[in-house]
Structures are given as C-alpha cells and as structure tokens.
Amino acid sequence: MMPWPSSPELLAPLSPWFERVRRDLPWRAVDLDAPHPDPYAVLVSELMLQQTQVATVIPYFTRWLDEFPDPQALAEADEDRVHKAWAGLGYYRRARFLKAAAGCVAAEGWPGDLEGLADLPGLGPYTAAALGAIAFQWPTPALDGNAFRVLARLLLVEGDPKARAADLRTWLAPALAAHGSSRMTQALMELGATVCTPTPACNACPLSDRCAAHLAGQTGVIPPVAKRAKPKDSHLWLVALEAEGHFLLHAPAAKGLLAGLWRWPTFEVARHPPQPMPQSPQSMTAWHGWTQVYTHRREAVSPLHILLEARFCPAGGLRWVPRGELAGLPLGKRDQRLCNLLETPEQIPLEGPDPKMLLTALSK
Ligand code: SF4
C-alpha cells in the first residue's frame, strides 16, 4: 500500500462540514451517533438510491414506507402491489430483492454481522457495508462510485480505484471508528454527490488543503473516465389498442429485467411498415413522442391509441385488460407515460399515421 496519511486525520474536516450542509432526508436519522431507529428504512433507501437520484427517490420512499411500513408488511404484500409501488423507479429487480430481503428479516431478524447482511437477497458488498455503517454503526466502509472518486483524488490513486478497493476499505475503516460510521459514510457520499463530482468544486471542499489530486492539479485525470459504449438507438410505436372497454397488454414475464411489469405492445418502426389490420379502426390517435433513455440504449417512442370495434383472440402472452384495471397494473416508466396520455383529455393529439397499419402480429 502507498504511504497514505492516516484516515482519521485526513478526513477530520468532513464531520463538521457534514453537520453544516447535511440535508434532511426522510431516511436520515437525526442522531448520527446512535444506531438508526429503523434499519428497514435505511435498507429501502439504499436500494432505491442505487441508480436513482435523491430527489426522485424521496416521494417513492415516503409512499413505500406508508404502504409497507416494516419488513413483515412488505414480505406479505402481493407482488403486483410491490411492483406498482416501485413503478417508475426503473431497475425493477431491486423491488423483488427488497421484498425477498424483507422476507428474510421478517422470518429471522436482522443479521448480526456484515457477512449476514451481504447474504440478504440483492445486497452487494457496497449496500451491505452502507447498511452496516448507517443502520448499525459498524465500521464497515461502503465504497460506491462517488466514494471511489473522492478517495482516488484525496490519495492520488492512479488507474481504476476499484482495483484498490480492499486497500481503500482498510484505509477508511479507522476514520469510521474515530468519527462515527454513519456520519463518515454519509459525509463521504454527500461530498461525492455534491462537491467532488466528476467536475469537482474544489473551492467549496473542506478537504482542499490536503487533497493530493487538487494540490497536484490532477483532478481532471483522477480517476480516469471509463469509456462508455455508444447506446443503441431504436424507434418504436408504443400501442394502446382498445376494444369493448379493454386494452391489450403483454402480461408480466416471470424472469428477466422486466419481470413483474405489464407492457404495451411495441413495434419497431423500421421493421414493421404499415400492414392491413384485421379490422378497420374506429379511431386512431397519435401523440408527440419522446426519447426514453436506458443505460445501454435509447428509444424514440411514438405513442398511439387505436380504437377497434371488437376484441380478437390475442397472440401468446397478450391479455385484454378491462379499462378500470389499468390504473392498478405495475408498469414501467415508458408504459405509464402512455397511460397518462390516455387519461389526459387536454393533450392535443397529432394527426395519426395511416390507419391501415400494423397489428396483424397481435392476433392469432
Ligand atoms: S479538493 Fe477537489 S478533488 Fe479533492 S476531494 Fe475536494 S472536491 Fe474532490
């Protein structure tokens, strides 16, 4: 290991800085020196915050705790309700993991050590360590992307700091023990999220007088930026097909990224040129589209509503859902947006495409 300065000394200014700037977040304990009064709230917040911004998470977190106030309530909840409560946050596996982890805690209580937390469904090393530190005050260093960036700069770690994860954890642990595990962990996260961002605001940083990368003028190159693959582009029709007071949707898959979610049928615009429909539509509405951005792809979405006179026998995996049940279905963000369009009369529909298009693929 490099001769790094001692972590309790180097990180000492973080504690008073955090007391000044800390935000009131609904999952954050008032007393950061005691174990958290509700470890379940910390677990929920940590899983929601993976891949999702704080501002987006807050209303979801509040509603979630109202609906599933403790591990027992979540473990016993119907899967559709759980997915519905998560709908819009994305990465739905997290909801299923959270429910499974709640089941373990409801049955056996909270694990007594880091290994036990890491064995809970869906908790990787980072989440287990964050939960250990924030909920239980264990000196378990939690390194996420933000913390890796801050430590890499403070200690002038060259190359990918994740390759030094074990060294960095060993280095950080004494600072947690000295200044409080919950406080230090959250202070480091806060610094990485608000000050030591990819383009850091060093003049607002409480550690600027001791940060090796700042003093060496190296903050632009440490840590090195990982090259991202270019996202794949596609252009889809997103279709709400209605007949006899029912809508046609894909029923949820049991596994995979979209498990548990209902979906509107989609058609790639380029691969599905207009085709004759099995029956003539009574009406067709097309709205302005939008671009849906995922981690590895971008979808240009063109939403459509097509009203038919009669239902037909749908192809495998598709179901006719009564209009009144639509609001209760768990849907992803993209698909919920089409629901909102259907429910918003003031939307001004665009002229639709040729009504003789597509949809033979939806019927048997
Ligand atoms: S001085 Fe700048 S680079 Fe160093 S920790 Fe603070 S914000 Fe990050």
Image: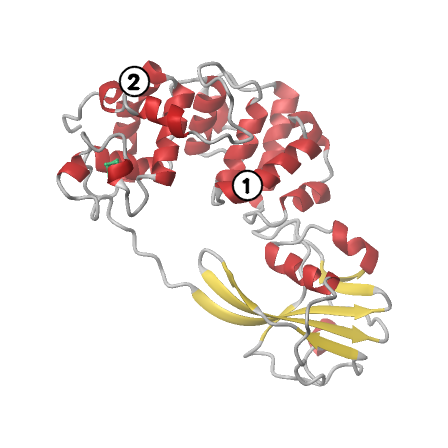
Look at the numbered discs 2 and 1 and tell me whether their residues touch, using CB distance below 8 Å: no
Residue identifier under label 2: 174
**What residue is shown at x 43% (from left), y 29% (from top)?**
22
Q: CA distance from mark 2 to mark 1?
A: 31 Å
User: 81 or 122: which is nearer to us?
Assistant: 81
* Quadrant assignment for the N terminus: top left
| Up/down of 242 relative to 213, above or below | below
Q: Which corner quadrant holds the C terminus? A: bottom right
Ligand 1 is found in the corner quadrant, namely top left
Amino acid at the residue labelled 1:
Val
Question: Dot 1 corresponds to which residue?
Answer: 57
Label 2 amino acid? Pro
- Look at the picture and state if 114 lies above or below 190: above
Element type at mark 1: helix
Disc 2, SS: helix
Residue 75, position as x, y percentages in the image: 68, 31
Counting from the top left corner in percent of width and height, residue 57 is at 55, 41
Mark 2 closeness class: few <14, some 14–19, many ≥20 residues within 10 Å: some
